Image: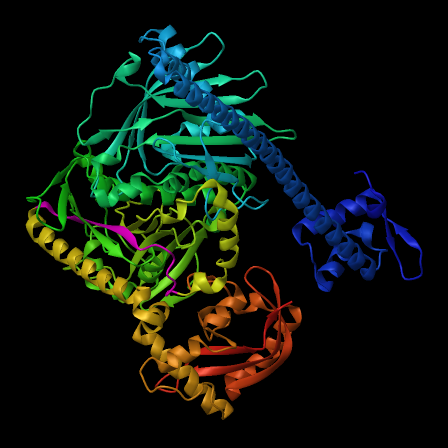
């Protein structure tokens, strides 16, 4: 093994150096990879086990490990900085290209302005002459050239493909579309890329540019497999493939997209896709719709689908120096908004929605796969991103299938004359039920042979989707019927809790078993265990505990055009990769396009306003308006049952969904900003348990410290809760266990930890303290448990983002419940501030 200068010698107290032999360095390196920070006992054990190190003092080995850790840290930091530099270089190149495009656009506008001004003057001068019409007409023909006729032959398809390529490039790098920056998206080394949406063009269009750590051919392969990353895509069928003389390929595709809500039909596309390599080595994959006006091959209409149009779209993939690819993504669609109710048309006319659901989804998929490849040796669930991504995709796909209820998948509507607010569909095809005929842990066989779906849609007013979604996730007891949940999973085998993860928090009777945060924290995948539901008996075959696999997405209310989803499905406790899934849940889609209606010259104003409004107080407070006034919520619940019980189950399911609709309407009304701060405050903490907890916190503080935590205020039932929530000091509660985790924090506590009520459950108490703080806490913890309180000296702690926070002092006390039993521990950080 070659030795560097730093590896070959180590400084001693007397100023001399000790040289290590290659064998000694190899032994030390081997131990370093096993344990980068060995204890003194382990270092002494190493000396005993390795005779070649016998003459080296333990202190020398300690210093060697310190230097080795320092070099490793420097190497990682250098690698990180190199990655950031690559991103900034690539982004600078993109910005320069964007500047060139805008310069060309300005020149084109100046030319067109002069052209039309000259034509206007000529038309005025020639108005007395009969030949003036020909002058104007000739100019119009020059501006709108006619497409040459084509046919379905290879030559005709190649002509369409070349035209598609030219149009796509003009959108990706040219001036064919007027692009404005996507609201809420700012370029930077940590951003997904540069995202823009169209302004004033036909249909809706979005464009994104970004750097991904994959080779161009791999990028093209992933993007062509649209159903794997676009969760709205039901299927893409390649009906014909034609090679071209330049080494490219022309494909004829038929694509289907799910409808996002029950109030609109699904879309399908008849497409031509052209893949080719350009002279500079860039790989291009471009697509467009085929129609009768081009005299090309035709695809007849398909029942239950509206034929939409894809204008020239695609991917420009450029290889980067040092590996990776720079990719330009363009999506341009005409979704035929005329075919949906007027209230839903903003959904089909929103370029921001297209950017979020399709354009940015493509970049996220590429970044996820690149990260998965870098973590290919991981084994535990929290580090298996490919498996977790597959689970989340299965949840989304299963929900979309139930929501759309296509007849070719076996779904049929049950007794609906079109006037019922809840639609019932049934599916008894063998393929649908093959994986549901399972055996219970007690030996009884499940005989369910039919799946039922109860679905409905409703319009919501003046409640941001992300805020409503968070409430539904955190307060399941506000809308769910636990006994009916247990009945709904009677066809799924459930046994002892063998799921990965540990109990880290609870909402009511929900126990959260964290599974994973997906890439970029866009989604949260978790397992929920609902305690004490039903009993496992031979007659009822009900599980004692209910396990749900749950997916949450769209929890950022500041994102534009983002739909929010809360999807869940009962799972087997063995948690096998092929576990049956019957997803149910909610989808909330914003309908107001107000945020994306700005013109290009207002981009800077919009960016600056986002700077001001992006603080934690906005994101953490449920009473935030969020700027959205209308949204559509779609609800779909699936149940497995025996076919002879169909009428009974349908009746119960219909009433259950109606009760959920009623609960959601009540919650949405309470969350509406129009109800003022009291209604808005009740929602983040929401339930009577929160009011009780606030009273316990105040009473326990008075009992142990002999002082009042809260100022005298109103005697209303919410007064203690309001005063705790608005207290100037950071108040956080954690479980009274060996490894305490946070269960509650007031607004100041959330601001200090730089987190939300949703993510608070993932933070343990020891994570926020430095080494000194942890030692202090360990020494004071017995006093807190025995005496009931302790006053801690000031120090430094860390937020969830790793930022240091100084506090003047901290007070810790036990919170007792009504029976004077310890409920949790409460910490109050006084005069905290970011360092």
Q: Compared to 561, does 338 lie above or below?
A: above
Q: Is residue 540 magenta?
A: no
Q: Nearer the viewer, residue 568 or 575?
A: 568
Q: Compared to 600, does 777 lie above or below?
A: below
Residue 531 seen in render: no
Q: Nearer the viewer, residue 608 or 260?
A: 608
Specify how the rendered protein is coloured: rainbow
**Which quadrant, please, contains the C terminus?**
bottom right
Q: Which residues are magenta?
A: 622-643
Q: Position of residue 475 (x, y in %)?
A: 31, 65
Res. 490 image quadrant: bottom left
- Residue drawn at point x = 47 percent, y = 21 percent: 118
Q: Residue furthest bottom?
A: 706
Q: Position of residue 425 (x, y in %)?
A: 14, 43
Q: Is residue 610 left or right of residue 401?
A: right
Q: Compared to 363, does 632 lie above or below?
A: below
């Amino acid at each position: 093994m070659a030795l560097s200068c730093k590896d070959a010698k180590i400084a001693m107290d007397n100023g001399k150096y000790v040289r290590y032999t290659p064998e000694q360095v190899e032994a030390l390196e081997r131990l370093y990879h096993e344990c980068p920070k060995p204890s003194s006992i382990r270092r002494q054990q190493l000396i005993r086990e390795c005779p070649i190190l016998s003459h080296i003092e333990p202190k020398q080995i300690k210093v060697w490990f310190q230097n080795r850790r320092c070099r490793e840290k420097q190497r990682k930091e250098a690698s990180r900085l190199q990655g950031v530099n690559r991103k900034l270089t690539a982004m600078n190149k993109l910005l320069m290209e964007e500047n060139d495009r805008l310069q060309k656009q300005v020149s084109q506008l100046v030319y067109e302005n002069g052209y039309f001004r000259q034509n206007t003057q000529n038309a005025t001068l020639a108005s007395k002459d009969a030949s003036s019409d020909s002058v104007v007409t000739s100019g119009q023909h020059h501006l709108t050239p006619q497409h040459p006729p084509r046919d379905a032959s290879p030559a005709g398809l190649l002509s369409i493909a070349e035209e598609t390529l030219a149009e796509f490039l003009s959108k990706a790098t040219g001036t064919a579309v007027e692009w404005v920056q996507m609201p809420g998206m700012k370029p930077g080394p940590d951003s997904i890329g540069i995202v823009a949406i169209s302004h004033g063009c036909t249909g809706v269009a979005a464009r994104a540019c970004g750097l991904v750590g994959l080779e161009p051919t791999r990028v093209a392969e992933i993007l062509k497999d649209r159903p794997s990353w676009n969760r709205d895509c039901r299927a893409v069928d390649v009906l014909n493939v034609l090679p071209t003389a330049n080494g490219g390929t022309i494909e004829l595709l038929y694509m289907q997209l799910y409808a996002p809500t029950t109030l609109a039909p699904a879309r399908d596309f008849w497409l031509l896709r052209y893949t080719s390599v350009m002279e500079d080595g860039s790989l291009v994959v471009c697509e467009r719709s085929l129609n009768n006006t081009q005299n090309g091959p035709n695809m007849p209409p398909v029942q239950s689908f509206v034929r939409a149009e894809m204008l020239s779209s695609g991917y420009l993939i450029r290889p980067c120096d040092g590996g990776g690819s720079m990719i330009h993504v363009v999506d341009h669609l005409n979704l035929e908004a005329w075919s949906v109710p007027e209230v839903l048309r903003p959904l089909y006319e929103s370029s921001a929605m297209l950017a979020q659901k399709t354009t940015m989804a493509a970049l996220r998929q590429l970044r996820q796969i690149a990260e998965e490849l870098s973590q290919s040796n991981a084994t535990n669930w929290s580090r298996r991103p490919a498996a977790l991504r597959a689970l989340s995709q299965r949840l989304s796909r299963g929900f979309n299938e139930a929501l759309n209820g296509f007849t070719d998948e076996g779904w049929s509507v049950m007794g609906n004359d079109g006037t019922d607010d809840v639609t019932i569909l049934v599916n008894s095809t063998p393929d649908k039920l093959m994986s549901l005929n399972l055996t219970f842990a007690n030996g009884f066989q499940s005989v369910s042979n039919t799946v039922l779906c109860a679905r409905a849609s409703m319009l919501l007013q003046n409640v941001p989707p992300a805020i409503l979604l968070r409430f539904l996730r955190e307060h399941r007891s506000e809308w769910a019927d636990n006994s009916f949940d247990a009945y709904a999973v009677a066809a799924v085998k459930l046994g002892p809790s063998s799921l990965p993860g540990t109990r880290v928090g609870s909402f009511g009777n929900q126990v959260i078993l964290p599974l994973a945060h997906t890439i970029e924290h866009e989604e949260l995948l978790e397992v929920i265990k609902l305690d004490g539901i039903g009993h496992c008996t031979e007659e009822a075959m009900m599980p004692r505990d209910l396990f749900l696999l749950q997916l949450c997405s769209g929890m950022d209310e500041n994102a534009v055009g983002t739909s929010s989803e809360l999807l869940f499905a009962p799972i087997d406790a063995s948690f096998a990769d092929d576990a049956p899934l019957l997803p149910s849940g909610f989808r909330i889609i914003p309908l107001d396009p107000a945020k994306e209606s700005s013109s290009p010259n207002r981009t800077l104003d919009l960016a600056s306003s986002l700077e001001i409004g992006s603080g934690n107080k906005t994101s953490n407070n449920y009473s935030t308006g969020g700027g959205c006034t209308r949204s559509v919520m779609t609800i779909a619940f699936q149940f497995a049952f025996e076919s002879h019980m169909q009428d009974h189950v349908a009746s119960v399911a219909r009433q259950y969904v109606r009760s959920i609709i009623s609960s959601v309407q009540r919650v949405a009304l309470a969350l509406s900003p129009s109800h003022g701060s009291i209604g808005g405050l009740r929602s983040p903490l929401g339930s009577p348990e929160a009011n009780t907890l606030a009273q316990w916190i105040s009473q326990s503080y008075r009992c142990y410290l002999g002082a009042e935590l809260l100022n005298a205020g109103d005697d209303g039932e919410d007064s203690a809760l309001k005063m705790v929530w608005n207290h100037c000091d950071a108040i956080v509660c954690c479980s009274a266990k060996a490894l305490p985790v946070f269960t509650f924090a007031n607004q100041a506590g959330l601001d200090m930890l730089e987190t939300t009520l949703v993510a608070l459950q993932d933070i343990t108490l020891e994570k926020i303290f430095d080494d000194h703080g942890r030692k202090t806490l360990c020494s004071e913890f017995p006093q807190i448990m025995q005496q009931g309180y302790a006053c801690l000296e000031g120090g430094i702690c860390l937020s969830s983002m790793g930022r240091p926070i100084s506090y003047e002092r901290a007070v810790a006390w036990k919170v007792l419940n009504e029976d004077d039993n310890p409920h949790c521990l409460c910490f109050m950080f006084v005069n905290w501030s970011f360092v």
